[in-house]
Each structure stands twice: as C-alpha cells, then as structure tokens.
Image (cartoon, rainbow, N blue to C red):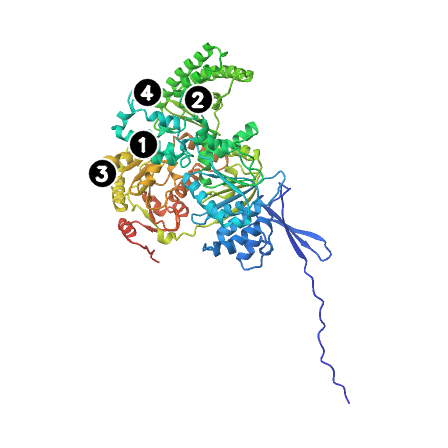
C-alpha cells in the first residue's frame, strides 16, 4: 500500500518584530531645526527602538512635517488613527471636550478641541531656561475662550492671568468662568476670580460728590448746572447717588456700571473718573479721603492678595499686563503674584497697546503742573533750576507749535522737519534736553535722600520728567527704530519695532504664553508674528482654527463699480472727487442699512471730511458719531441705528456684535499716509529687511483690510455688508486674499435685497 504523501504545509515564519518608535519634544537644544523646512519652532526628535533596546534617531521635525504616525494624539484621532493615552491636564481636557461638554448640549468643535489640547499640553510642560508660547489664529466663532478656560480651570493652584482688550470680553469671561466653575464643582477645587480694569473705568466718589455741588464752577467759571442746561439733571443724579451710597454692597466696585446707573452726561464723565495722577488736589488719589472705599484702590489691592494653595484667575487688560511686566523688569515685583501662565486674548490689539506703553511723550501743557508737584516736596532743588526748565519748555513749545504748522500738521501725528529745514527747532530741543538733564540729576539726588513719603503723585511726576528726557534723547539720536511725531503742543517718540521691548518683558518671567485672536496673523506668517512680538527665543506651538461662520450666506462684499480711480492722498482734487462720487454712494448705503454702520478711513483728514459731509449735507434720522467724541464706543454700541466715522484705531479692537453694526465701509484700499512718521519708520525697517517699498505697503494694507473686515461678523447670528468704495478692489488679488469668502457684488440693489431678506442664499 502506497502511503499518500501528506499535503505539504508551508512553514510558519516566525513573527517579525517591528521596531517601536519614540517621539520626544526637544526642550534643551535651542539650535534644533526641522529637517524638512528648517523651522526652529517646537522640534520633535523621532527615534526607532529595536527589540534589543537600541535607539536610532530617524530625524528631527516640526509639528507640520512630523510623519503621520508620529503626530500628537489629537491630530491622529482627527484622521481616524488610534490615539495614545494622554495624562494630566491633557487627558482631563480631552474628556471635557469629547464627553462632558457634549453631554451639556454644546457641540463638539474639532478646531476648538485641538486648540485646547495644545494649551493643556503647554500648561503641563516644565521647560528649564526656555519659554513656550502658543500662537492661536482662531477665527470668530471657534470658541477660543473655552479652549483656554477649561485647561486653566483644571489646574489646582497658582495664579493664571487672562488679558483682554475690551470690557465686553471681560464680562463674557466672567460669565463663562461662572458656568464652568459650577460644572466643575464636583472636583472640589477652590477658585477665586478677580477683574482688574484700567483707571478710566472707575468712578471717583470724591469727584462725584463734588459734581453734586450745584454752585461749584469749573476752570472757565461756569457752573455745572449751567453746562447741563438744567439743574434737574443734577438733582436726578443726586437722588441716584444717594440710593447707591445707601446700598454699598450692590455698587462696591464703583466701575463703569455706576456711571450708567447715574445717567451722567457723556461730556461730564471725565469729571468723575479716577484721577490717579496730576496736580495734587482734594480730588486726586494722593490726597483722597475715600481710599478705603475706593473701587479703583480696592482693585489694585486685590492684585496682591491671591490666596495661596488654590486656583486664582486674574482678568486684566493689555495695558495693566504690560505695566505689570514692566515693573517686574525694573523693580523685580509686579502688580500681582508671579503667574503660572499668561493668556492674551484679542492679541491683535497688542501692537497698539505695546506701542502706547513703550512710547515716550513730552506734553508742554503739563510741564508747569508737574514742576509744581515736585517743587512742593523736593525743597532742596534750586528754584532757579525749576524756573530754567519752565522757561526752556515755553521757548521749545513755541518752536514746536511753529514747526507743526510749517509741516501742515493736522490731528495728532505729523512728521518732524529735518535739521536743515528748521535748525532753530532742533536748537530749542537741545537746550531743553541739557537743562532737563541737570534738573533730573538734582531730583534723583533728592529722591535718594529719603525722609519723605513718596506718594503716587510724586512718583508719577518723576516718571513723567524721565519720560520727557527719554523723548528728547530719542530726538537727538534719531534712527529708523523710532518714529518722531509732532503735535501742536507735544512731541512723541514712538517705537517702530516692538520686538526688543516685548522680548525684554517676556524674559522677565519665563512663563507659558498663549496669544490668540480671530485676526492674530492679519496677513503675516506665524514666524513673522513671533518676530514682531519678540518671541524669537520661545518654543512655539502654532494653531490655525478657521471660523465656522457661514460667510457665504452671512457676508455680502460690495465693491464700487469701475469708474474714476481715487486721487492720491492729499491731492487737491481729492475733496472734489469725494463730493462727486463718494458721498452720494455713502448716503445711499446708509439709507439702505438704516444706519448701523462703521465708516473707516486710513486718513484722518478724509475721515473728518466724510463725517462733516454726512452731518451737514444729508438728512439722516440717526446720529453720525466721530471717533474722538466722549464715550463714543459705548454710545455707538447702545444706539443700534448710529453711524461711527473714524480712522486707524477703529480698524482694531472694536467688538460690537448684533444689530448695532451691520455695515462696514472702507473708503479706499488702505494706503499709509506718506507723511505719517510711524509709517516712514516702518517702511525703513522693512527695506532694511529686504522688502521693497511696494511690498511693505501691501503688507500694511492687507493687515488693515483683514482687521477692518473682522469688525463686521462677530457672532453666529450676525449678518452684514462690507463695502469697499474703491473700484480698484474688484480686480486686486491682495484684497480678495485678505477678505472672508463672502459673495461679491457691484450692485447696490443686492444690498437692499440682502438686508430685506431674513435668510440670504448665495447663488451657486
């Protein structure tokens, strides 16, 4: 019998063990760069680990070029891969966004979740000698406040600072924190939340009581009752004040809410705000009898009273944040305890606030009052020296006013004449600088001797004189890093490059930073943004979270039809062009939108012409407001039909969601005013960096277009029209790249259809 051969079975191969991999964020090597793009930001080392345990590095990559299988856990999850098990704040944050928030009816937003996980990861990091920053370009509607609040509220102790640019966001954060704290109450964590506002947001009880004196007169000899036109208004305020004083617990903050409750007329609001500095008087903080009950002073004290061992959240504004960092750099102690992390929301306005902070100014109108303050305390400073400073200041002020007029000065920023054009102007500045330097030496000697109480008013007076000296020094060494601005009665030195100053502040406390805004980049790259804000030596995590808003149905972009090109800035034919072509179109747009508009121009002169024409040449039923009017932003937000006309500063930092803003008009493609000293300095810096003048101008224009358009759609329910009254915009690729993806039109009738339709459908 023949045996059947058994079917040959293939040999089972022994399993092949693939080498495991390890991905490590490089924290201790400042020279590490990505093997693909050369970026130095947030570099990961990828290691292959053999079964024997031998490690071999496969490369170094930034987060963008990290191989897909080596991406951080939340990035792999988004593409369907299994995620690693996260720990600490990252794991808890992930649980909140994937489970707990959806269980409370909040939708899962992948972009918001990714941003939150990046922030949580940074809060968990311990990096010796190297700071970390998150740059999050998070579009409107992403929900960026929850993205940073949840990782912060999951911490158990320490001080966390959140800085904003507007009161609206501060109030929103208080509501969000209250809601999240109630949801997290099961964790048993203890939490304190403090809000620190600028002095302009607080009411002075002493000055308010002074306002109640009906027979009191101001510096012009007019009684307050006469200014108001009727004493009944003051009597109504007096009754409201009596009610507030009888219920102190309700009104303890004495902030802007008090002003609204008292219905104080807008032109009198400056008379009742806190006056921290200036000439010592019964109404200044230096001699105040109500310090213990002052809301402003209580706010400042609260900054130093963080409770140890628990979580403390401080909500501040950008100005206070910069003041705190500056004090730490100069004195080693800030306005509050050293924070564990700093979040800067509405970071697009950081440029403006930092430029204000670093600028120095010599205002000749305050010279005599500051000298009087110092004379009253520093008895040993020779009176002849004080008179010499006053005399030189008056002579220089006359030269400044003459130079301002000679260069065609208008508004608050005109260029300096050259030395060859006006040598007398520069001689006067040099003489004042020499006299002021000798005076300041004497002041510092007297301050060092001690023996007297240094009140806030005295310290501020000394800081003011030091600012004068710094301004004059900037004039004497004038370089491209500084813009010198001329006013009728003042001179200002404005830094064109903020990077060095900000880098010095960031390096004072190497704590994690989170900078976020809906228009964070404003046409720049992440690398350019980091450079401009002094973050060169930070490890960066760059986050892009596009807006979920349906711009195709919520935004209509109107471009004026092809026609005559607008004249150049300050061309004599410019006003005639505006009266013939621009003003009638503006009036038609405002009638269609029924007001509710923001009109922007990069030229103060053009903006003023527009405001004057709209007020005088047309009959509107709604108010036409000018940007320099008292309390104008609150009035614009409160009056849903009003129109606000303004220039540069309104392109950023204005947040008016809802019906009060449904039309944004930009009069022409933004171009810098050639005579603007700040633009001249920025252009010189750009050319040093290798850019042409045209490239620098387009970068500037793109940034302003993005910021200006960003004022319009501020919530999921907002709908509006962006009107570009410049025919060149229709075919300009830079303009189209800068704006959201709305529908474009050149027909005014489409605007009427847009506003009259409850739901607007963009055609395919």
The residue carrying pointer 3 sits among few (fewer than 14), some (14 to 19) or many (20 or more) residues within 10 Å by Cα, namely: few
Distance from Cα at disc 1 to Cα at disc 2: 27 Å
The quadrant of the picture occupied by the N terminus is: bottom right
Residue 566: where, in percent of width, then height? 31, 39
| Location of residue 164 (image quadrant) | top left
Please state which of the two labelled residues, at mark 3 or mark 2, is closer to the viewer: 2
- Disc 4 on helix, strand or loop? loop
Image mark for residue 239: 1
Q: Which residue corresponds to mark 3? A: 618
Q: Is residue 413 left or right of residue 54?
A: left
The residue carrying pointer 2 sits among few (fewer than 14), some (14 to 19) or many (20 or more) residues within 10 Å by Cα, namely: some
Distance from Cα at disc 1 to Cα at disc 3: 40 Å
Please state which of the two labelled residues, at mark 4 or mark 3, is closer to the viewer: 4
Image mark for residue 287: 2
Q: Nearer the viewer, residue 532 or 224?
A: 224
Q: Earlier in the sequence, mark 3 or mark 2?
A: 2
The answer to whether 759 is drawn above or below residue 518 in the figure is below
Q: Earlier in the sequence, mark 1 or mark 3?
A: 1
Distance from Cα at disc 4 to Cα at disc 3: 37 Å
Q: Nearer the viewer, residue 442 or 315?
A: 315
Q: Which residue corresponds to mark 4? A: 219
- Disc 2 on helix, strand or loop? helix
């Amino acid at each position: 019998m023949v045996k059947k051969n058994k079917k040959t079975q293939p040999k089972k191969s022994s399993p092949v063990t693939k080498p495991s991999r390890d991905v490590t964020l490089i924290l201790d090597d400042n020279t590490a760069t990505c093997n693909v793009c050369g970026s130095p930001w947030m570099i990961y080392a990828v290691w292959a680990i053999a079964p024997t345990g031998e490690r071999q590095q496969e490369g170094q990559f930034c987060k963008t070029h990290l191989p897909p299988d080596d991406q951080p856990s939340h990035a792999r999850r988004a593409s369907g891969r299994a995620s690693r098990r996260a720990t600490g704040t990252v794991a808890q944050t992930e649980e909140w966004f994937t489970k707990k928030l959806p269980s409370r009816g909040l939708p899962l937003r992948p972009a918001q979740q990714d941003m939150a996980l990046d922030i949580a990861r940074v809060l968990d990091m311990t990096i010796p000698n190297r700071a970390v920053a998150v740059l999050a370009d998070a579009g409107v509607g992403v929900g960026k406040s929850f993205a940073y609040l949840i990782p912060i509220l999951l911490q158990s102790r320490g001080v966390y600072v959140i800085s904003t640019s507007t009161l609206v966001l501060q109030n929103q954060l208080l509501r969000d924190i209250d809601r999240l704290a109630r949801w997290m109450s099961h964790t048993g964590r203890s939490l304190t939340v403090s809000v620190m506002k600028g002095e302009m947001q607080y009411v002075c009880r002493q000055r308010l009581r002074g306002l109640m004196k009906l027979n009191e007169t101001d510096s012009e000899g007019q009684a307050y009752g006469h200014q108001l036109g009727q004493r009944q208004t003051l009597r109504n305020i007096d009754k409201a004040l009596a009610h507030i004083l009888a219920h102190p617990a309700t009104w303890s903050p004495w902030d802007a809410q008090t002003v609204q409750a008292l219905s104080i007329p807008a032109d009198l609001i400056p008379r009742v705000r806190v006056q921290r500095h200036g000439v010592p008087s019964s109404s200044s903080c230096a001699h105040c009898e109500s310090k213990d009950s002052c809301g402003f002073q209580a706010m400042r004290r609260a900054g130093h009273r963080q409770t140890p061992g628990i979580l403390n959240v401080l909500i501040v504004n950008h100005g206070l944040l910069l003041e705190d960092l500056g004090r730490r750099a100069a004195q080693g102690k800030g306005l509050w305890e050293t924070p564990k992390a700093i979040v800067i929301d509405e970071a697009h306005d950081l440029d403006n606030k930092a430029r204000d902070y670093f600028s120095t100014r010599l205002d000749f109108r305050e010279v005599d009052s500051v000298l009087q303050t110092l004379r009253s305390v520093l008895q040993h400073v020779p009176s002849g020296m004080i008179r010499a400073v006053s005399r030189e200041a008056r002579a220089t002020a006359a030269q400044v006013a003459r130079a301002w007029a000679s260069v065609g000065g208008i508004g608050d920023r005109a260029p300096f004449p050259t030395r060859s054009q006006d040598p007398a102007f520069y001689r006067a500045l040099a003489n004042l600088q020499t006299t002021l330097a000798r005076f300041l030496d004497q002041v510092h000697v007297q301050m060092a001797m001690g023996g007297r109480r240094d009140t806030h008013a005295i310290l501020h007076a000394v800081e003011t004189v030091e600012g004068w000296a710094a301004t004059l020094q900037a004039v004497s060494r004038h370089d491209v890093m500084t813009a010198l601005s001329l006013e009728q009665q003042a001179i200002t030195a404005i830094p064109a490059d903020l990077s060095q100053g900000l880098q010095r502040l960031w390096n004072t406390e190497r704590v994690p930073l989170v900078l976020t805004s809906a228009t964070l980049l404003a046409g720049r790259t992440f690398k350019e943004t980091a450079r401009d804000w002094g973050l060169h030596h930070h490890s960066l995590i760059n986050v892009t979270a596009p807006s979920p808003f349906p711009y195709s149905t919520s935004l209509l972009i109107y471009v004026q039809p092809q026609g005559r090109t607008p004249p150049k800035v300050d061309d004599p034919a410019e006003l005639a062009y505006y009266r013939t072509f621009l003003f009638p179109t503006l009036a038609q747009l405002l009638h269609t939108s029924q007001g509710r508009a923001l009109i922007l121009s990069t030229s103060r002169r053009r903006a003023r012409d527009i405001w004057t024409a709209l007020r005088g040449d047309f009959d509107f039923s709604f108010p036409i407001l000018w940007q320099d009017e008292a309390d104008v932003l609150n009035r614009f937000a409160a009056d849903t039909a009003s129109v606000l006309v303004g220039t540069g500063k309104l392109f950023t930092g204005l947040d008016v969601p809802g019906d009060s803003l449904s039309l944004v008009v930009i009069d022409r493609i933004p171009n810098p005013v050639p005579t603007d000293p700040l633009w001249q300095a920025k252009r010189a810096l750009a050319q040093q960096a290798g850019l042409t003048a045209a490239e620098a101008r387009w970068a500037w224009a793109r940034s302003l277009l993005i910021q200006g358009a960003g004022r319009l759609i501020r919530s999921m329910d907002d709908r509006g029209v962006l009107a570009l009254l410049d025919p060149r915009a229709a075919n300009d690729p830079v303009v189209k790249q800068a704006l959201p993806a709305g529908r474009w039109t050149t027909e005014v009738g489409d605007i009427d259809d847009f506003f009259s339709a409850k739901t607007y459908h963009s055609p395919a």
